[in-house]
Amino acid sequence: MFDEILGLPVHPLVIHAAVVFVPLLALIGAAYAVLPRHRARLGWAVVLLAVVAPVSALASWLSGRALLDGRFGGRIPPGVVGERIAEHESLATPLLISTAALGVAALLLVAVARKAGPAPDAATGGRRRAAAGSAGNTTVTTVLAGVTIVLAVVAVYFVVRTGHTGALAVWG
């Protein structure tokens, strides 16, 4: 299934989805975290990308395994190319885990932020107090926003490093 499409290896085809969707999730998730006034407009994109980005990372991971199995019998070849493939492969799992964690954190942030209600009104100077029941949600929202930002940075780091090492493995 993750081997070939029309005679071409799937991996170089599907990695581009991860290269696009993971940074998009990171960017829009971070924007959602730090721009509460725009959450109503960004929420749908965060939810969509929180699903699509991890799925694209998983497809890339699976197709990479299939490529290694199909081209090299599941073994990393010796030499410089093998070293480059090994480095690329060693980054794939952290990329998948960080992207999945970012997706979960972003979904939780959207859910909690929606329960907490709208952002403080700028017309009142932000002095409107949250109801007693949603004060805890505000703290949870702040913590989840921070976690989302940290995971966004981590996921972007791994997508860039993984892509770079993959390009080096292929193009030297």
Image (spheres, rainbow, N blue to C red):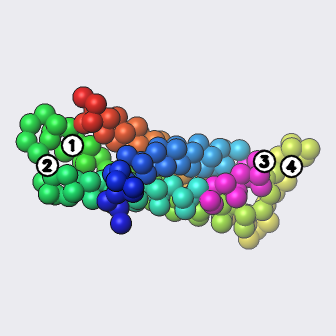
Our reading of the magenta stretch's main secondary structure is helix
Would you say the residues marked 1 and 2 are in contact, meaning their CB atoms lie under 8 Å apart? yes
Q: Label 1: few (<14), some or many (≥20) within 10 Å?
A: many
Disc 2 residue crowd, few under 14, some 14–19, many 20+, Cα 10 Å: some
Residue that label 3 marks: 37
Q: Position of residue 106 (x, y in %)?
A: 57, 57
- Name the kind of residue labelled 4 in the image: Asp
Q: Which residues are magenta?
A: 36-48
Q: Tell me which label, 3 or 2, sits earlier in the chain.
A: 3
Horizontal and vertical percent position of residue 114: 72, 64
Q: Quadrant of residue 6?
A: bottom left
Cβ–Cβ under 8 Å for marks 2 and 4: no
Q: Which mark is residue 62?
A: none
User: Which residue is more in the foreground, 26 or 147?
Assistant: 26
Q: Position of residue 122 (x, y in %)?
A: 86, 44
User: Element at badge 4?
Assistant: loop
On the rendered structure, is 11 left or right of 75? right
**Pointer 3 local density, CA inside 10 Å: few below 14, some 14–19, many at least 20:** some
The residue under label 3 is which amino acid type? Arg
Q: In this orientation, which residue lies closer to the viewer: 127 or 61?
A: 61
What residue is shown with label 1? 85
- Which residue is tagged 4? 121
- Is 56 placed above or below 162 here? below
Location of mark 2 (residue): 76
SS for dot 3: helix
Q: Secondary structure at mark 1?
A: helix
